[in-house]
Amino acid sequence: MNIYLTIFGKPRYLGLAKIKMEDTRPRWIVLKTSRGYEMGLPGGMLTDEQHEAFRASNLSFEDTAEPMVQDVDFVRWADDEDVANYYDCRQEEAEALLQGRDILAAHGLPMKLVDVEYMLDRKKLYFYFTAEQRVDFRAYVRDLAHEFRTRIEMRQVGIRDEARIVRGVASCGRPCCCGYWLRGFSPISIRIVKEQRSALNPTKISGLCGRLMCCMSYEQEFYSELWAKLPGPGAKIRTEKGAYILESLDLGKEQVNIRFPNGRLVAVKISEFPDFRDTVLKGEEWGEDKELAEKKKKAAERIAAIKERAERMKSAQKMRAQKARKEKEKVNEKEKDAEAPKPTKPKVKPNKEGTQKRRRPRKPQKPEE
């Protein structure tokens, strides 16, 4: 025989029962518990480690004597008669609840009747109620016993356990965790809500019981580790260029939104935040500012290169113009030289020998005295 985890009772107690499983189909079983004979459903076979873990986590139901994890005895596999009897009990419980509330109104006791539960053999009827203080309900119990002709057991439960017993649909659209799978209640404070940066609106953070929702504690470990690495919203990183303000956190995208000194809102990855902080403290740019600075730098370098090239082209054009001007001046000088008249030689008469005899220049005459 193997040990199976079973679920029974309206408060969803957990039982450890030795069962010889005949097949794997989910079937009702009859159990003998500390409260009497009850119907239960086997959840699954436990390993030795799981068995010890469940025994170690024997959480007590709030304000009740019954522990959440109990040793129960397997009686038999439920037949059709047992199942029909079980559902008949559920129908009678609805009528018994209304009758019990009418009797309670006649007594005028400061308590609220939450639910009732019949044992399978109807030898015991449990009444679950809530109250802010101790209530003397002895006369009320006598009237109940006279009305239902069975043994009456009163169980005071807390507000959260009321939601667990009654069950319902949470704001997420799914059944309440406490009435579906949750075995115990962990303490939840407003500090947890603040760490998760949830809106402090009671209608959004409260469950059907009016207390803080149990699901607030599911991610608490993650948020504790997260805020150990990050400053809280509103924190400032002061630098020479101004203050960088951490405004909000976006878990879906795993990033924080930071307001830069120039007013821009920039998203920074959570994993990159330490590098971001070191970078801005050094006075360097980050993200789009860094890219913009690099673009401006490259643009300035391109502009400087263009100006330098333009200067070189202008200087080259100036040199070419000077060279062309000098060449033009040379051409003009040559043209002027070509157009100027050539000097003529004096004419001489040929002598008898056929040679030309040069004329001797006349001597200047002396002036007459």
Image (cartoon, rainbow, N blue to C red):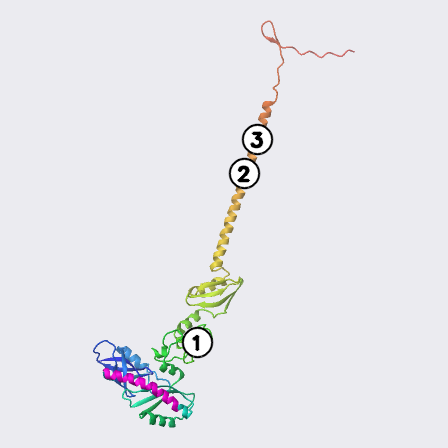
* Amino acid type of the residue tagged 2 in the rendering: Gln
Q: Quadrant of residue 62?
A: bottom left
Circle 1 Cα neighbour tier, 10 Å, few/some/many (<14 / 14–19 / ≥20) = some
* Amino acid type of the residue tagged 3 in the rendering: Lys
Q: CA distance from mark 1 to mark 2?
A: 79 Å
Q: 138 left or right of 73?
A: right
Main SS type for the magenta part?
helix
Foreground label between 3 and 1 = 1
The residue sitting at 39% across, 90% down in the picture is 102
- Whichever of callouts 1 and 2 sits on the residue coming sooner in the sequence is 1
Q: Which residue is mark 3?
A: 328
Q: Which residue is mark 2?
A: 317
Q: Where is the C terminus found, in terms of image quarters?
A: top right
Q: Where is the N terminus found, in terms of image quarters?
A: bottom left
Q: CA distance from mark 3 to mark 1?
A: 94 Å
The residue sitting at 36% across, 94% down in the picture is 143
* Highlighted magenta segment, given as a residue range: 79-103
Q: Quadrant of residue 225?
A: bottom left
The answer to which of 134 and 367 lies nearer the viewer is 134
- Whichever of callouts 3 and 2 sits on the residue coming sooner in the sequence is 2
The answer to whether residue 222 is visible is yes
Q: Is residue 24 magenta?
A: no
In the image, residue 127 sits, relative to residue 369, either above or below, namely below
Circle 3 Cα neighbour tier, 10 Å, few/some/many (<14 / 14–19 / ≥20) = few
* Amino acid type of the residue tagged 1 in the rendering: Ile
In the image, residue 259 sits, relative to residue 41, either above or below, namely above
Q: Which residue is mark 1?
A: 205
